[in-house]
Image (spheres, grey):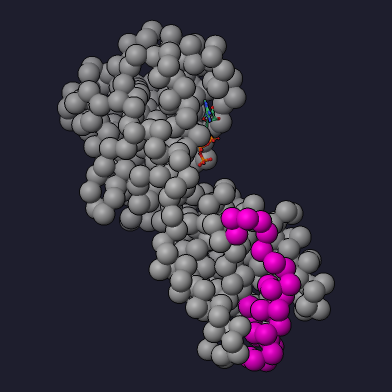
């Protein structure tokens, strides 16, 4: 292994820079030359790369975003796109490629492997935590804290004005951020896709719960944390629906892209540093077609195809205790 390339793809996540740094430092340590491709798979098509020296990654471990930029890339998904990427990688004399991204990026890795003989390793980098085979993904812990900081502030004003707030968090089609942010913020209600596999939540049940809380506590604040994509029209439409059903003012707050930004928290920096360094060692050992993850504090090698199957479960104990909070109010307890 003389030369390896790396890129960041899909939604950016805090900690991607820490992973880039770890890969570049480990590469230099083991005398491998790292190339950074910019703008995700677009960089492979445009041959947009540069050599990365240790000084390029100085002082980036604490920065959100990614110095390599990230992007989505439709042309890459075609056969011609992957063939062009393969030709360009060969022309740049790249022996192995490390892709930091989400499940879509890993499907892209698999797609490329049909046309390129070099080694490919994925690192899970997405705030959504929706990647199978690793307990957490790079960026997930920071996104929880970012959402939580905002929800705590909304709670302050909700409490002062005794208002109902529906707070929409990211997660694509997974409820990891929603569950963690909901439990940690003391939300009265949490709506996650995993809890409603057969359809939508029952709006009358939600409305009844809000009315019940107000009845037993008197006028009070009430926080509902909901995952994006759980309700058609999102928090705005559900707030309207619940306002109509309860006759109580319900306000939507959509946290949006703030959840993707910010300085990574220590857990994300540690995860990214470990996964990045290990990816280089695995690459040197000739491994390919795998994602590097961490389970129970052990670094693991997961076949790429396993990484995108949707069998990763929410923490069942967190789900249980959140449900208990919901039931306490439902059963008339003014906790
Ligand atoms: P996040 O979930 O954080 O947004 P992601 O990696 O899942 O990250 P996607 O937009 O799904 O983000 O995928 C990133 C890129 O990977 C796409 O723009 C595309 O170039 C490539 N890709 C995604 N799915 C496929 C696929 N099935 N075949 C080939 N390439 C794909």
> Measuring 56% from the left and 77% from the top, which residue is drawn there?
326
Where's residue 129, x and y in %?
45, 49
User: Does the image show residue 91?
Assistant: yes
> In the displayed structure, would residue 288 be above or below residue 149?
above
> Measuring 29% from the left and 47% from the top, which residue is drawn there?
294
Q: Dividing the picture into quarters, in which one does residue 329 lie? A: bottom right
| Quadrant where the N terminus is found in the figure | top left
Per the image, is 99 magenta? Answer: no
> Measuring 52% from the left and 40% from the top, which residue is drawn there?
11
Q: Foreground residue, 20 or 187?
A: 187
Where's residue 300, x and y in %?
26, 42
> Measuring 59% from the left and 87% from the top, which residue is drawn there?
331
User: Does the image show residue 63?
Assistant: no
> In the displayed structure, would residue 118 be above or below residue 120?
above
Q: How many discs mark residues in the rendered view?
A: 0
Q: Dividing the picture into quarters, in which one does residue 219 lie? A: bottom right
Residue 14 lies left or right of residue 33; in this view the side is right
Q: Foreground residue, 323 or 120?
A: 323
Magenta stretch in the rendered image: 196-222
Residue 192 lies left or right of residue 307; in this view the side is right
Q: Foreground residue, 236 or 325?
A: 325
Q: Dividing the picture into quarters, in which one does residue 113 lie? A: top left
Where's residue 204, x and y in %?
73, 72
Where's residue 98, x and y in %?
35, 28
Per the image, is 198 magenta? Answer: yes
């Amino acid at each position: 292994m003389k030369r390896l390339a790396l890129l960041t793809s899909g939604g950016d996540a805090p900690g991607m820079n820490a992973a880039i740094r770890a890969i570049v430092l480990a590469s230099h340590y083991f005398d491998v030359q790292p190339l950074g491709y910019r703008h995700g798979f677009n960089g492979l098509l445009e041959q947009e790369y540069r050599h990365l020296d240790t000084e390029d990654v100085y002082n980036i471990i604490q920065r959100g975003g990614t110095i390599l930029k990230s992007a989505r890339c439709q042309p890459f998904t075609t056969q011609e796109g992957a063939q062009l990427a393969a030709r360009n990688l060969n022309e740049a004399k790249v022996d192995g490629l490390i892709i930091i991204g989400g499940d879509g990026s890993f499907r892209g890795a698999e797609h490329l492997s049909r046309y390129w003989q070099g080694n490919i390793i994925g690192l899970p980098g997405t705030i959504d935590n929706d990647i199978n085979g690793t307990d957490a993904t790079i960026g997930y812990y920071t996104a929880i804290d970012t959402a939580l900081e905002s929800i705590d502030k909304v709670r302050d004003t909700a409490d002062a004005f005794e208002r109902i707030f529906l707070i929409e968090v990211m997660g694509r089609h997974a409820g990891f951020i929603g569950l963690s942010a909901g439990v940690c913020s003391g939300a009265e209600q949490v709506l996650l896709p995993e809890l409603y596999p057969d359809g939508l939540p029952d709006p009358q049940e939600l409305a009844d719960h809000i009315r019940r809380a107000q009845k037993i506590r008197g006028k009070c604040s009430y926080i509902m944390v909901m995952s994006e994509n759980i309700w058609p029209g999102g928090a705005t439409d559900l707030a309207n629906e619940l306002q109509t059903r309860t006759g109580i003012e319900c306000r939507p707050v959509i946290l949006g892209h703030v959840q993707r930004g910010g300085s990574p928290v220590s857990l994300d920096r540690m995860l990214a540093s470990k996964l990045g360094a290990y990816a280089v060692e695995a690459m040197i050992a000739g491994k390919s077609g795998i994602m590097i993850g961490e389970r129970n504090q052990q670094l693991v090698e997961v076949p790429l195809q396993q990484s995108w199957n949707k069998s990763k479960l929410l923490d069942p104990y967190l789900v249980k205790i959140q449900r208990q909070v919901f039931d306490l109010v439902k059963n008339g307890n003014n906790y």
